[in-house]
Amino acid sequence: MKRRLVWLLTAFFAAGLASAQTPGDKQPSVIMAPIGDVQVKAGGSTNVSFDFRIGPDFHINSNKPRADYLIPTVLTLSPSEPVAVADVQYPAGEDMSFVFSPNEKLSVYSGDFSINTVLKAPANAASGTYPVKGQLRFQACDRSACYPPRSIPVQFRVTVVKK
Amino acid sequence: MLVVVIMGMLAAGKYLDRSRKHGPIKLVGDVRNVPAPNFDLPTLDGRRVKLSDFRGQAVLLNFWATWCPPCKIEMPWFVDIQKQYGKDGLVVLGVAMDDTESAKIADFAHEMGVNYPVLLGTDQVSDDYGDVRSLPTTFYIDRNGNIVSKAIGLLGREEIEDDVKKALSAAYKPVSQANRAEAKVKSARVQEATQ
């Protein structure tokens, strides 16, 4: 419930910012839902999902864009030891094309998308709370223009508990 | 008298404060008929190019980047337009706004068959042209160095050609040094008024 409220408030402010801008001056918005309490047992692993929302009318490249020259969306996490990243799973992109080049398909995310990760802690990890910092790097476009690559910060805590 | 002096000092202070806050005056708002800011930028092949080198010719100044799919769609059109209208006095200039090594930009331009100079953009030139953030952004500049049109985002080829024709249609009027200085002042006033 609390998470939904934060989503709504964040989206409301993002929409207000977007509407205050003039055409050509708009900036794409990508926001992340807050990460709740993350707990992992020493010697075990846990799934953590990162939920992102892209502002209306914008899209960003998927993690596997269809051309080398495009900038993929990448989530980078740097957890404090002993927490480590075991896996990062990106969603598949959706196909889209620009009006003047209908045959050239791009692989993009738009609206809401989630990146699923697995965090782990070794068996000898000391109990405690460990910060995780990171960023989501993306490059956004709308139906006619593109905007320079940007990053948004990702920050949360992982609590390691004994088995 | 004292009131006039105080008013003058306040006005000067306000101007200086605004200059400190905003830096040089930028090209914003309706830029038609405003002199295009000059620049001196390196090309992919190691030369330097100034906009003023092309006085007497119309210039299509296209800000683009390798990561920009709509820019890629326009490039073959610009290649054709350079071939078609070059004899009439059109020069296409690409300004790459990539934050990457020039070799990668050169490979991309080569792959796209680009037949016009590609310049390496800077924050300064972006600022001078009104903080170019959306790509592609294209300025159409007439033979006298004045902006005829500005297009943000991908347009159709016909619209691009219409703007090229507008840029080519103005007759070249060589201006004296004094007239050029006057035009600069006029440009600054127009830009300030739009802020």
Image (cartoon, coloured by chain):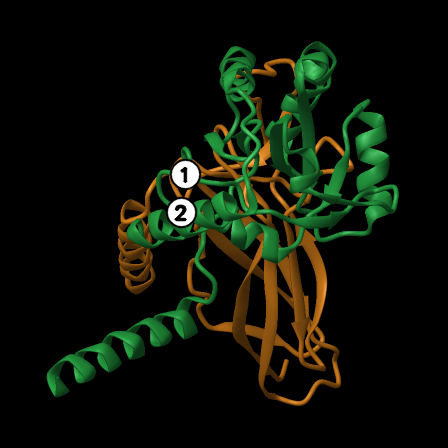
Chain colours: A orange, B green
Q: Which residue is mark 1?
A: B31
Q: Secondary structure at mark 2?
A: loop
* Image x and y of residue B2, in percent: 13, 87
**Residue A87, quarter of picture:** bottom right
Q: Chain of mark 2?
A: B
- Which residue is painted at 82% across and 51% down in the image? B101
Q: Check contact, mark 1 vs mark 2: CB within 8 A.
A: yes
* Image x and y of residue A55, in percent: 40, 44
Q: On screen, B135 above or below B40?
A: above
Q: Is residue B27 visible?
A: no
Q: Chain of mark 1?
A: B
Front one among B187 and A85: B187
Numbered badge on residue A144:
none
- Which residue is painted at 71% across and 16% down in the image? B86
Q: Which residue is mark 2?
A: B28
- Which residue is painted at 40% across and 47% down in the image? B28
